[in-house]
Image (spheres, grey):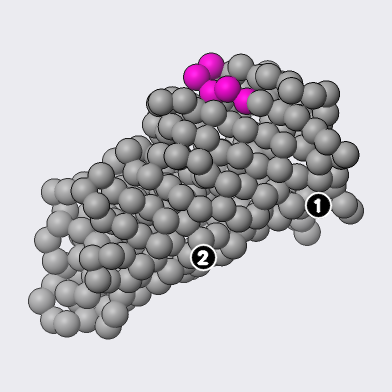
Amino acid sequence: MKTSFVKNGMLACLGILLVFTSCSKDEDTEVGTDDATAAITAEQSKQTAEAEMSTDEVFNIIELAYAENEEGAGRNQSYFPDCVTITISSENGVVFVTLDFGAGCELQNGAYVSGKINFTYGPPVAGTVTVTYTLEDFTHNNRAVEGSGSLFRERTNDNGNPQHTVNHELVITWPNGVVAQADGTRVAEWIEGVGSGTWMDNVFSVTGNRDIEFNTGFSHYAIVTEALRKEVTCPHFVSGAVEITRNNGMGTLDFGEGDCDNLAVLTVNGQEIIIILD
């Protein structure tokens, strides 16, 4: 990665984790015929998963960049390729960072992003730091992601691991004009690979909930019922489950038992459908 120091100062921060993935358009038929079952379809789950993937990618980037720049997490092998330009400056103990992905940049996990993520933070206080971020013309896999907010990071949680919590309000826009407002709380604990100096053994455990409102007229509420395991070498969650509620319908999206694959199982009223993740 290319790093430009505008002033001498602390190294940059940016963070985390994780990604819901998008579902195949081949799976766009309704799961059932009664009102409750019909309230959740594979196509709607696809859109929800895509929104989750884009928002989680933002925080994944922030967490990994923060760990690399402040804690030397990438001293042996960085998560960020040469197409990312990182600019860092500091003033009166406050650090200002810009991650510039240009017109397009493929990250190590295969995600394709463009635009900028700007963030700032002050000195840690009692092992914690608040990172304030703003997205500038940022896209993830051709979806525009807009918004700003703050991320609270603990160097050591009750389990002795780094952890961050973020309450987010982001807007995702698809190329076809579909718009989603994604609001929620996300907690990501870094459970493996801390201090190894490379991104390749990093694993996160993700919990939280979110409301997603679409301009097409439907909304989803999703809550993690079984912690999602995110191995950074894999583009998808490898295990965990999310409960999804839409209008009168309720379903569960299960990401498996630990294999790195692109499959999840949507279950509604006892009926199962396999979702193929991009």
Disc 1 marks a residue whose amino acid type is Thr
Q: Quadrant of residue 87?
A: top right
Image quarter where the N terminus lies is top right
> Is residue 138 rendered to the left or right of residue 173?
right
Q: Position of residue 142 (x, y in %)?
A: 32, 38
Residue stretch rendered in magenta on the structure = 82-86
Query: Which residue in the structure is indicated by mark 2?
Result: 184
Secondary structure type for disc 1: strand
Query: Which residue in the structure is indicated by mark 1?
Result: 128
Secondary structure type for disc 2: strand
Residue positioned 67% across, 50% down in the render: 132
Q: Quadrant of residue 178?
A: bottom left
Q: Is residue 52 magenta?
A: no
Asked whether residue 160 is in view, the answer is no
Residue positioned 21% across, 48% down in the render: 176
Cβ atoms at labels 2 and 1 below 8 Å apart: no
Magenta part, dominant SS: loop
Q: Position of residue 78 (x, y in %)?
A: 61, 23
Q: CA distance from mark 2 to mark 1?
A: 21 Å
Instruction: Pick whichever, 229 or 244, lies toward us.
Output: 244
Asked whether residue 28 is in view, the answer is yes
Instruction: Pick whichever, 259 or 211, lies toward us.
Output: 211
Q: Badge 1 local density, few (<14 within 10 Å), some, or many (20+)? A: some
Q: Position of residue 93 (x, y in %)?
A: 87, 39
Q: Badge 2 local density, few (<14 within 10 Å), some, or many (20+)? A: some
Q: How many marks?
A: 2
Image quarter where the C terminus lies is top left
* Residue 109 higher or lower than 216, as above or below: above
Disc 2 marks a residue whose amino acid type is Gly
Q: Position of residue 169 (x, y in %)?
A: 51, 61
Residue positioned 43% across, 61% down in the render: 182
